[in-house]
Image: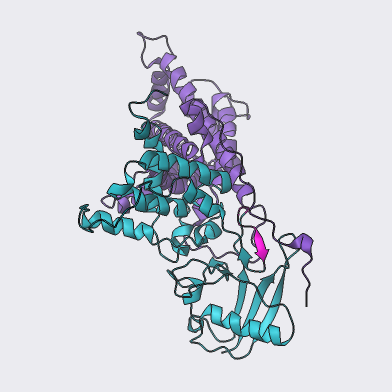
Amino acid sequence: MSKVDNAQRYVGAPRPAPAKKDGPFFVMFWRSAVGKKWIMAVTGIMLIGFVFAHMLGNLKIFLSASSIDHYAEWLRTIGYPILPETGVLWILRAGLLGAVLLHIWAAASLTRMNRSARPNGYKSPREYVAADFAARTMRWTGIIVMLFIIFHLLDLTWGQTGVEEFKTGDVYNNIVNSFKRVPVAIAYIIANIAIAFHLYHGAWSMFQSLGINSPRFNPWRRGFSIGVASIIAIGNISIPLLVVTGVVK
Amino acid sequence: MKLTLKIWRQDGPTAKGRFETYEMPAVVPDMSFLEMIDVLNERLIAEEAEPIAFDHDCREGICGSCSMMINGIPHGPERGTATCQLHMRKFKDGQHITVEPWRARSFPIIKDLAVDRSPLDRIIEAGGYISAPTGAARDANEILIPKEAADAAMDAAACIGCGACVAACPNGAAQLFTAAKYSHLSLLPQGQPERWTRAIGMVDEMERWFGSCTNFGECETACPKEISIDFIALLNRDYIKAQFKNRRLSGQKS
């Protein structure tokens, strides 16, 4: 019979984290997890919008070389002459960078909070019923996408990955010369599969985080996220796939 | 039926726990899960061994005391059922069953399968009530409430505070509990005056103890009362709205 010594008697509930200090409302909002999830949803919508527009523009590669080169040139001159050349482009870039940083910052901070909520995990295997693969791998697909974005910028924006005859502005040839390298094409395809999984959960999850929930359209939310994820996956993967297989050259 | 139980034993809050295996040669299929543990405990007492500590009270699925992970699912494999209402006929003869306590930083183990769930009470204290001096009961039909609103509030009020949502959540979040306790008041007229202070109070208190919601939906499937994560969306939306309004302070100088 096991004896319980007094040192092991139950001494009371655990201590909570300290209460939030008072501050301006937007600081208080950021300090709360619900607020951070709201910001993740809003920045997520911005990033989905970007990924979608980016894909639409890049699909011009299937029309003609001059078509995509012309589109790339147009990006630099939106809003000209009322704004300086590349003015709108830089505003968009700044917005995107801000959204990405907030999204990652919020995710990292929430992950820390969630890890500390269960420091001592289950000792027997869990049986997940609702938490699907996409939802449970959000952190990993997020990291894959982040690393991919860095590689993608080095590859096709700055030409630092040894793309043959890399020339800024020569978009069509740069893409073809990059994607005809098999390992690079595979990396692009894998990264886009990761994006699709990330969006499958994210595009559904954002409705919950924003509190957009109504029996009238709830069944559509899952369909929406499947649609977003598959359109982006198919559109983006088609480019490296058709280049590496030699259909586009 | 014959079953093999692997149960988490832990002598005290700071003791090192371990799984112990118990053979159950003659389990009656009509026993509830807790009755089966009672039988095992009778045997352990007869053998002068320490019986297994576990929480239980009403044994009719309404008190929220019984809390255990059964084969990796809170309250076991049967949906919408608390452990006390889970019958052994739901298991197969010869099956191995692993039983573990809830695990969360704010649910420390007291002994064996019993954990301290008092942090859930702290969330209620932060706004899960209405402040109204009570006198004689008012006529039931004096405050008119649409049937749909009453039904939705009742669905949320079904929460028995067992903590299965926290146990199921990969993040250890208590969002479903808080959302249920928040919503059943905030869907009714009596809950309106304090709605916005309630949203902020309960969410802020919850986040001091538990993880955050990442919309896995695991809590909904574990909930013995099958409370919908739709209430989490309502809580999230009201928390945002509450940032912009606070009726309690209307007309007052801060």
A187 above or below B37?
above
Q: Residue at x 49, y 66 (%)?
A: B64
A171 part of magenta stretch = no
B121 above or below A96?
below
Q: Residue at x 41, y 49 (%)?
A: B129
Instruction: State the extent of the magenta-drawn residues as a range.
Output: B105-111
Indicate the colouring scheme: by chain
Residue B72: percent from left, percent from top: 57, 67
B154 above or below A99?
below
Q: Nearer the viewer, residue A210 or B207?
A: B207
Q: Nearer the viewer, residue B15 or A91?
A: B15
Using the rendered view, name the quadrant where residue A182 is placed.
top right
Q: Which quarter of the figure is the C terminus of chain B placed in? A: top left
A118 above or below A34?
below
Q: Residue furthest front?
A: B135
Q: Residue at x 72, y 64 (%)?
A: B12
Is residue A245 visible in this depiction of the protein?
no
| Count of numbered badges drawn on the protein | 0
Q: Nearer the viewer, residue B24 or A108?
A: B24
Q: Which one of the lettered chains is coloured cyan?
A: B
Q: Nearer the viewer, residue A182 or B41?
A: B41
Is residue A28 visible in this depiction of the protein?
yes
B108 part of magenta stretch = yes
Residue A95: percent from left, percent from top: 46, 24
The colour of chain A is purple
Residue A51: percent from left, percent from top: 43, 35
